[in-house]
Amino acid sequence: MNDKDETDALFDSQLIIGPTIVAGSPLLRHLHAAGEFDIDDQENVLYLPIDQAFADKLGCSRYAKEPIGPYTEGMLQQLSALEASPDGQGALAGDLGSTVRTVNAIRRLRDTVKVALINGDLVVAYRE
């Protein structure tokens, strides 16, 4: 059996909440420092097709090394709204109950985005 090189790969791992989003979100930075959010958690990864034509066939988003601006901006807007909520403010202040509810809200956001990427309702890359 021959080893395939990287150019033969069909999929690559896409971070749903990547480093740029974490860097732009005071809430995520706080939760990361508190050990409540891990960017490398398997639940934060989705394997997407590298090739646009293949993604079109599957009806899903295509992989992007760095997500497009509108994707990042939309995620940061949603996280900003969570941060401004009473639970977000409580989490920033160290309240355990607020932290649990905020982390669960972030998980719901992440999981919703995953489904939208799989269904092709949301994209992380411009069309080639």
Image (cartoon, rainbow, N blue to C red):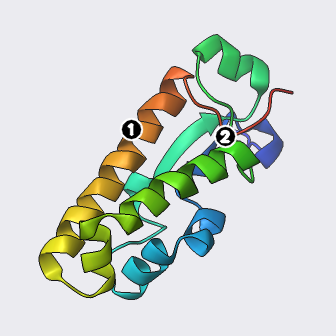
Task: Give coordinates of residue 22: x percent, y percent.
Answer: 55, 70
Residue at position x 12%, y 74% from top? 97
Q: Does residue 105 show up?
A: yes
Quadrant of the frame with the C terminus: top right
- Cα separation, mark 1 vs mark 2, equals 14 Å
Q: Is residue 62 left or right of residue 105?
A: right
Mark 2 — residue?
A: 124
Horizontal side, residue 18 vs residue 8: left or right: left
Q: Which quadrant of the structure image shows residue 23?
A: bottom right
Say whether residue 3 is visible.
no
* Of callouts 1 and 2, the N-terminal one: 1
Q: Quadrant of the N terminus?
A: top right
Q: Name, please, the residue furthest toward the top.
A: 57
- The image position of residue 37, as x and y in percent, is 38, 72
Identify residue type, mark 2. Val
Q: Residue furthest right?
A: 128
Residue count near mark 1 (Cα–Cα under 10 Å), binned few <14, some 14–19, many ≥20: few
Mark 1 and mark 2 in contact? Answer it, CB < 8 Å. Answer: no
Q: Label 2: how many residues lie within 10 Å, few (<14), some (14-19) or many (20+)?
A: many
- For badge 1, the amino acid type reads Thr
**Residue in view at x 48 percent, y 30 percent:** 116
Residue 103 occupies quadrant: bottom left
Above or below, comparing residue 107 to residue 40 in the picture: above
Q: Position of residue 34 (x, y in %)?
A: 34, 87
Which of 123/92 is in front? 92
Q: Is residue 72 above or below residue 94?
A: above
Residue for point 73% across, 40% down:
2
Residue 67 is situated, as x and y percent measured from the top left of the image, at: 70, 49
Q: Circle 1 is placed at which residue position?
A: 112
Callout 2: SS: loop
